[in-house]
Image (tube, helix red, strand yellow):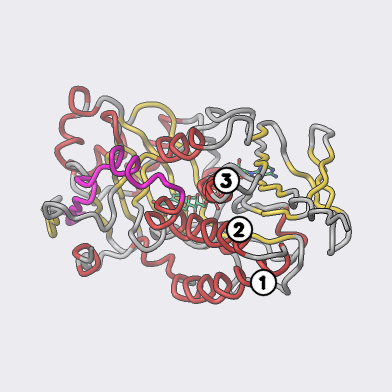
Amino acid sequence: MTITPTPAPRIAVIGAGPGGLTCARVLQVHGVAATVYDRASGPDDRNQGGTLDLHPDDGQAALKEAGLLEEFFRLARPEGQEMRQFDAATGNLRFHHEPAEGQLSAPEIDRGQLRDLLLDALTPGTVRWGHALQSVEGPADGPRRLHFANGTVVEADLVIGADGAWSKVRRVHSSAIPRHIGVNYLEAWFHDVDDRHPEIAEIVGLGSAMAADGDRCLFAQRNSGGHIRVYIIQAGPADWLARAGLTEQDTDRIRTLLLDRYRDWSPGLRRLLTDNDGLYLDRPLYALPVPHTWESDPTVTLLGDAAHLMPPLGVGVNLAMLDACELALAVAGHDTVADAIRAYEKTMLPRSTEMQSALDGAAAGLLSDEPFDPSHLDAD
Ligand SMILES: Cc1cc2nc3c(=O)[nH]c(=O)nc-3n(C[C@H](O)[C@H](O)[C@H](O)COP(=O)(O)OP(=O)(O)OC[C@H]3O[C@@H](n4cnc5c(N)ncnc54)[C@H](O)[C@@H]3O)c2cc1C
């Protein structure tokens, strides 16, 4: 009797963010092939944003399974765990944490460095750029048909939605759409800070610096290569810039508006609003309704922001990478894709519901002037 081996499932990961790339890498470490599709035209298509801290129990654990932890520590900045909190009105230092020698609870890495670390570890050709998913068709028991904006149609036995906040894959499972959380980030960048912006470099130090007054906040972080990114955090509607008759191109008028809004802040801190290089970038914040769950489907699942978009309070990337790692391990360790999805979602959905619930309505925390709670900084 000839036994025909079951063909390997065709796995399509939608999204080459930290979640999608981690998933593809851990699958490949276990000999499971996967193709990643991303709408970006290439890896450098868009500004990758700032710096991320990866924690031992999730982001770092995922990189360990990906065989990349050592390389991560070669790139990471443990000194980035330094944290300063200033009084908004006086500019006086209220709290200062400097990481102890060997503290690795939340070392920082630039988002672009993390992306390259994961991308470079994948089998060449794994990522298909320029593929913006439009819809997922086909029966629940597969095969699924993926329709891309460039006209390509691809069949897959497992579709992994790692396509972020505005996921198209999510529509298979739910009609949930992200809601604005009533808070907006305006991003400002400072380059070559030690030479060109020494006062800013002095305020921020090697890690993060923040000040808040309950209505407004400034959160600055040093990135590698002498760059500092500042989030100007304000409550308001998502279209606050348009309501003020402004666009991101109106640098001078945005500055004037900010100086007025932060008029009672210390002059030193106000330099974080005005001395930046280049344009301000408007980033309204959204979150999915809580809880966001669905009935298990044998051919489609979600991870990261596609599954549980939350306010950015330092867990998003870590959870996306943990989801990705656990899903890949489940696929490698189960006989069928359907069993793997069930096993993965059994852990992931309660975990993300718990975290979503904890952070739901936490938007005010982004503006809080409460003294910084240092308790988690020492946990290694
Ligand atoms: C302003 C801001 C600051 C943040 N700061 C932090 C922080 O300091 N620490 C932290 O842990 N988290 C932070 N987060 C959250 C963090 O960015 C996300 O949780 C994390 O990136 C989620 O990873 P992901 O892989 O699920 O999705 P993403 O990183 O969003 O990646 C999704 C990928 O899917 C692709 N894609 C999207 N749609 C399609 C489509 N239709 N077809 C094909 N490809 C598609 C995108 O191009 C992208 O590459 C922040 C978020 C914001 C908005």
Label 2 secondary element? helix
The residue sitting at 70% across, 72% down in the picture is: 294
Residue 286 percent location from the top left of the image: 55, 58
Under mark 3, the amino acid is Gln
Residue 138 percent location from the top left of the image: 88, 56
The boundaries of the magenta stretch are: 66-90
Under mark 1, the amino acid is Arg
Q: Earlier in the sequence, mark 1 or mark 3?
A: 3
Residue 83 drawn in magenta:
yes
- Image quadrant containing the C terminus: bottom left
Q: Nearer the viewer, residue 273 or 9?
A: 9
Q: Name the quadrant containing residue 173.
A: bottom right
Q: How many marks?
A: 3
- Identify residue for label 3: 28
Residue 332 shows which numbered tag?
A: 2
Label 3 secondary element? helix
